[in-house]
Amino acid sequence: MDKAAWQAIAEDAGLRVPWKWKVTRAADLEEVADRADYPCVTKPILGHLGRSGDHRTRLARDPSELRGQVARALDDGVAMLVTEHVLGGRRTWRPW
C-alpha cells in the first residue's frame, strides 16, 4: 500500500490528515529533519518493503533519530514517509 497516495486521496476528500513528507533521496533528509515537529513517525512509503532490513514504522524523538532511521532505509533502497505523530489508541478513542 502506498501510504502517501492514500493520504493524498483523503486530503482531496477534505479530510484532515497528519502532515507528511516523502523522503526518497538523501538530499531531502536534512531539510525534513530541520523542519519536522518532534516526536514524529517514520515509515516506509510501501509498507511491504519495510520488512526487509527492519525499516518498520518507528517514532523519531529528535532530528538525530529521524536522520538515522531514514538514512538506513534509503541506503537499502526503501523510500520513507515522515509524518506527524498523532496520539490515539483505545484510551483516547471516542465513538461519536
Image (cartoon, rainbow, N blue to C red):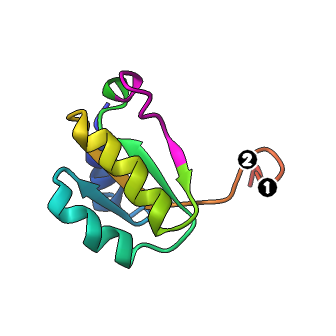
Residue 71 located left or right of residue 41:
left
Secondary structure under tag 2 reads: loop
Residue 78 located left or right of residue 89:
left
Label 1 CA crowd tier, 10 Å (few <14, some 14–19, many 20+): few
Residue found 36% across the figure and 78% down from its top: 35
Q: Quadrant of residue 31?
A: bottom left
Magenta stretch bounds: 50-58
Give the image location of residue 91, x and y in percent: 84, 50
Residue found 41% across the figure and 34% down from its top: 55
Label 2 CA crowd tier, 10 Å (few <14, some 14–19, many 20+): few
**Which kind of residue does numbered mark 1 sit on?**
Thr
Secondary structure under tag 1 reads: loop
Position of 76 relative to 48 (above/below) = below
Residue found 54% across the figure and 70% down from its top: 38
**Which kind of residue does numbered mark 2 sit on?**
Gly
The residue pinned by badge 1 equals 92
- State whether the magenta stretch is mostly helix, strand or loop: loop
Task: Specify whether residue 72 is in view.
Answer: yes
Alpha-carbon distance for marks 1 and 2?
Answer: 6 Å
**For the view shown, which residue lies furthest in the bottom direction?**
35
Residue 8 located left or right of residue 89:
left
Task: Specify whether residue 3 is in view.
Answer: no
Is the Cβ of the residue at disc 1 closer than 8 Å to that at disc 2?
A: yes
The residue pinned by badge 2 equals 89
Query: Is residue 38 within the magenta segment?
Result: no
Give the quadrant of the N terminus: top left
